[in-house]
């Protein structure tokens, strides 16, 4: 209880995201390993259009309180609903490139914002 009172707002948000991951039966991003098929849940921090190999690619950084993973949709310039601040669930094969975790062409489900407020 004392830790929650002394924790920063960022630490509290991270703890809430990790709790939601557990409630939904998803894997914490920090626990995802290379070549592991998994489901992650979090909030999009950034969304960028970045060509890969001459083809368009939409990249989004997903944060779950434990770490980040890059979600990359090859051949896409835009996906409706994929925008910073949006909560979503993604499922696919994780690969580690350098020090970054990446999931290419993940299946995803947009999550309603503030669903705990209902």
Image (cartoon, rainbow, N blue to C red):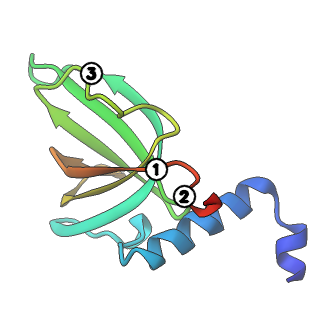
Specify the quadrant that holds the N terminus: bottom right
Q: Residue furthest top?
A: 54
* Residue 98 position in % (x across, y down): 30, 49
Tag shown at residue 115: 2
**Mark 2–mark 3 contact, CB under 8 Å?**
no
Measured Cα–Cα span from mark 2 to mark 3: 31 Å
Secondary structure state at the residue bearing disc 1: loop
User: Which residue is located at x 40 percent, y 41 percent?
Assistant: 61
> In the image, which disc is placed on residue 50?
3
Residue extending farthest to the front is: 118
> In this rendering, would 68 be left or right of 11?
left
Query: Are discs 3 and 1 less than 8 Å apart at CB?
Result: no
Mark 1–mark 2 contact, CB under 8 Å? yes
Q: Earlier in the sequence, mark 3 or mark 1?
A: 3
The residue depicted at 32 percent of the width and 69 percent of the height is: 32
Q: Secondary structure at mark 2?
A: helix
Q: How many marks?
A: 3
User: Which residue is pictured at 49% across the width and 59% down the height?
Assistant: 64
Relative to 52, say whether 61 is above or below. Answer: below
Residue on which the image places disc 1 = 112
Closer to the camera: disc 2 or disc 3? Answer: 2
Say few, some or many: other residues with alpha carbon within 10 Å of mark 2 (under 14 / 14 to 19 / 20 or more).
few
Tell me residue 53's x, y (percent).
9, 23
Badge 1 density bin: few <14, some 14–19, many ≥20, Cα 10 Å = few
Up-down: is 106 above or below 33? Answer: above
- Look at 58% across and 53% down and name the residue there: 114
Tell me the mark number nearer the camera, choosing from 3 and 1: 1
From the viewer's perspective, is residue 23 above or below residue 91? below
- Residue 113: x and y in percent read 53, 48
> From the viewer's perspective, is 72 left or right of 55?
right
- Residues at marks 1 and 2, CA–CA distance in whole angstroms: 6 Å
Q: Nearer the viewer, residue 29 or 23?
A: 23
């Amino acid at each position: 209880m004392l830790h929650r009172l002394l924790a920063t707002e960022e630490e509290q948000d991270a703890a809430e995201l990790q709790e939601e991951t557990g409630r939904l039966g998803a894997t914490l991003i920090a626990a995802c390993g290379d070549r592991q098929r998994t489901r992650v849940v979090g909030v999009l921090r950034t969304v960028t259009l970045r060509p890969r190999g001459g083809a368009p690619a939409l990249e989004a950084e997903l944060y779950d309180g434990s770490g980040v993973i890059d979600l990359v949709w090859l051949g896409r310039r835009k996906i409706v609903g994929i925008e910073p601040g949006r909560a979503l669930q993604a499922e696919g094969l994780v690969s580690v490139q350098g020090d970054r975790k990446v999931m290419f062409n993940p299946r995803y489900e947009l999550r309603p914002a503030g669903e705990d407020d209902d």
